[in-house]
């Protein structure tokens, strides 16, 4: 029998929300997931643009409780990732535990419980509230004069309009990040006339993406140590792979390798345009499976570097006065990565809202909790390891810790929140770790866009595991049931 007295509400049914849901289900804790759209999958539901592949090994993007032996490639296409996520939700019986098309707009901690309100005006009450609302979720549009005047189809990369045929159109893609690179490459290879507008060049990883052989798929199914061996190998590689964290020969070798990719570009002027002027790794590195640099040298592909000053009905005007014409405009301009659960209105102790708490700067304890917000947890919140630990592995460690904290709180009939002092200590520890990492190389990126400390985990994978296994109970305060307003 599930425990009906104690209840958890989870916001979001992406990878994080589903992982949390499965864990709560196994722990026989009563819960409901609210998902603002009509389908699971989050990122992988929203981003359907051409050329999108997962950037870590497909096998590293699996829930540990449901391996998939059928990935078609080393790095699976986004469509496969989404299909896998939907299958997990179905196979695990999670779909029926999700309230779809129900956005949580407010949550308030009163009398020891979270009082939840949805956009439809429905309410719910829970002991624990978990925000699995994603960190790359809210599309960001640049503030360019005249954007409403564009006469053709225009859309954000996370809202791809599949009704627009590729052929016979001139495409304009604004943005040089991972999405912009992948979209430009895919459109160029599809034979479209495509212009990519970049303000700065990116380091691009040109990688091989072979199909999975039937032998490999078979080996995965066989009993024995093959999977264990694979995991040990990944662990070793990930632990060894520390070039982002500290200077040294490993970083120099990476810099050399990435510089050598630029040699694919024959035209010196184009090479100059696409040569980054900041250190490798400072921004998230776009991955290209078929060679972006070759694609942009096709006669139908164009790179325009500079500032767009205005959007006009049939294209854009650049700062130097040149006009570039096209029929379809794609905003590959990223996300408000510092929004987290916002615009949801979350109110903790003493009427403190999340907007007030984060007004000056974004912070958290371990990326999972906030002082003054008892029994509120975040998955992949601020300072989660978005760059150096595969997301499912990071979630596994975060969720185990959250479950332990929930257990401690229940045992004390209390609600749990990190102390302000422990949060300060955590932030201070991060602060001392950033110098020497690639993320403080003076480039503009989404990790730092609103504050000087990048919202990242600046330690190796093993430290993430150790941190969550050893979170001291003393770092938390327990607020007796019924308190808090
Ligand atoms: C284009 C793109 C490519 C990426 N590629 C990779 C990759 O290759 N490898 C990698 O590791 N990571 C990648 N990421 C990062 C990716 O976001 C994470 O890997 C992962 O999918 C995050 O899952 P999540 O569940 O935390 O968030 P999301 O996938 O963003 O899901 C959040 C869910 O919460 C719902 N939601 C939000 N607010 C509310 C609310 N108020 N009420 C109810 N529901 C709400 C949303 O609708 C959504 O379904 C990529 C991200 C993007 C945008």
Image: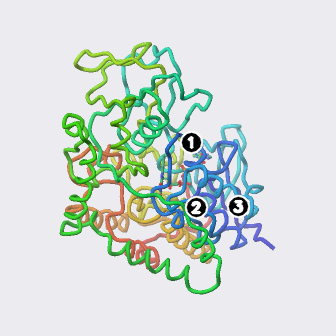
Expressed as whole percent of the image width and height from the top left, the position of residue 338 reads 41, 46
Residue at mark 1 to residue at mark 3: CA–CA distance: 30 Å
Queried on whether the Cβ of the residue with tag 3 lies below 8 angstroms from ligand 1, the answer reads no
Residue linked to disc 1: 48
User: Is 234 located above or below residue 164 in the figure?
Assistant: below
381 or 473: nearer the viewer? 381
Residue, x 64% and y 57% (percent of image)? 85
Q: Which structural element holds mark 1? A: loop
User: Is 335 located above or below residue 195 in the figure?
Assistant: below
Residue 103: mark in rendering = none
User: Is 467 located above or below residue 260 in the figure?
Assistant: below
- Which of pointers 1 and 3 lies earlier in the amino acid sequence? 3
Q: Which structural element holds mark 2? A: loop
- Which of pointers 2 and 1 lies earlier in the amino acid sequence? 1
Q: Which structural element holds mark 3? A: strand
- Which of pointers 2 and 3 lies earlier in the amino acid sequence? 3
Residue linked to disc 2: 483
Residue, x 77% and y 67% (percent of image)? 4
Which image quarter holds the N terminus? bottom right
155 or 324: nearer the viewer? 324
Residue linked to disc 3: 31
Kindly indicate the quadrant of the structure image that contains residue 334.
top left
Residue at mark 2 to residue at mark 1: CA–CA distance: 45 Å
Task: For the residues labelled 1 and 3, say whether their Cβ atoms are less than 8 Å apart.
Answer: no
Expressed as whole percent of the image width and height from the top left, the position of residue 107 reads 59, 48
Kindly indicate the quadrant of the structure image that contains residue 171.
top left
Mark 2, mark 3: which one is toward the viewer? 3
Label 2: how many Cα within 10 Å (few below 14, some 14–19, many 20+): some
Task: For the residues labelled 2 and 1, say whether their Cβ atoms are less than 8 Å apart.
Answer: no
């Amino acid at each position: 029998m599930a425990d009906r007295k104690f209840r958890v509400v989870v916001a979001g049914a992406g990878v994080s929300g589903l992982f949390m849901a499965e864990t709560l289900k196994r722990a026989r804790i009563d819960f409901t997931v609210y998902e603002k759209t009509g389908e699971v999958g989050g990122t992988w539901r929203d981003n359907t643009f051409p050329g999108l592949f997962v950037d870590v090994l497909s096998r590293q993007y699996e829930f540990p409780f449901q391996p998939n032996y059928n990935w078609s490639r080393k790095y699976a296409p986004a469509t496969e990732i989404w299909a896998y996520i939907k299958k997990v939700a179905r196979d695990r019986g999670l779909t029926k535990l999700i309230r779809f098309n129900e956005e949580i707009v407010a949550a308030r901690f009163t009398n020891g419980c979270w009082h939840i309100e949805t956009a439809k005006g429905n309410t719910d009450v829970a002991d624990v509230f978990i925000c699995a609302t994603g960190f790359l979720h809210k599309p960001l549009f640049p503030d360019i004069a005249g954007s409403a005047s564009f006469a053709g189809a225009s859309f954000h990369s996370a809202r791809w309009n599949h009704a627009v045929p590729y052929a016979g159109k001139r495409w304009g893609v604004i943005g040089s990040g991972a999405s912009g690179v992948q979209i430009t490459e895919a459109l160029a290879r599809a034979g479209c006339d495509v212009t990519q507008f970049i303000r700065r060049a990116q380091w691009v990883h040109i990688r091989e993406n072979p199909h999975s052989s039937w032998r490999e798929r078979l080996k995965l199914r066989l009993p024995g140590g093959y999977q264990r061996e694979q995991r040990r190998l990944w662990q070793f590689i990930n632990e060894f792979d520390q070039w982002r964290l500290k200077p040294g020969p490993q970083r120099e070798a990476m810099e050399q390798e990435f510089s050598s990719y630029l040699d694919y570009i024959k035209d010196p002027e184009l090479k100059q345009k696409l040569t980054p002027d900041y250190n490798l790794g400072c921004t998230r590195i776009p991955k290209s499976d078929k060679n972006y640099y070759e694609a942009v040298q096709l006669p139908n592909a164009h790179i325009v570097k500079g500032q767009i000053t205005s959007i006009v009905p049939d294209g854009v005007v650049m700062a130097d006065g040149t006009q570039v014409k096209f029929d379809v405009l794609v905003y590959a301009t990223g996300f408000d990565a510092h929004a987290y659960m916002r615009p949801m209105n979350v109110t903790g102790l003493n009427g403190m809202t999340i907007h007030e708490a984060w007004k000056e700067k974004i912070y958290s304890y371990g990326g999972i909790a906030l002082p003054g917000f008892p029994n509120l947890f975040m998955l992949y919140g601020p300072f989660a390891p978005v760059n150096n630990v595969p997301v499912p592995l990071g979630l596994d460690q975060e969720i185990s810790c959250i479950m332990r904290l929930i257990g401690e709180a229940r045992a004390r009939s209390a609600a749990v929140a990190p102390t302000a002092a422990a949060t300060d200590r955590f932030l201070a520890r991060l602060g001392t770790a950033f110098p020497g990492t690639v993320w403080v190389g003076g480039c503009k990126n989404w990790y730092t866009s609103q504050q000087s400390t990048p919202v990242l985990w600046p330690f190796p994978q093993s430290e993430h595991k150790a941190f969550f296994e050893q979170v001291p109970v003393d770092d938390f305060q327990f607020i007796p049931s019924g308190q808090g307003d």
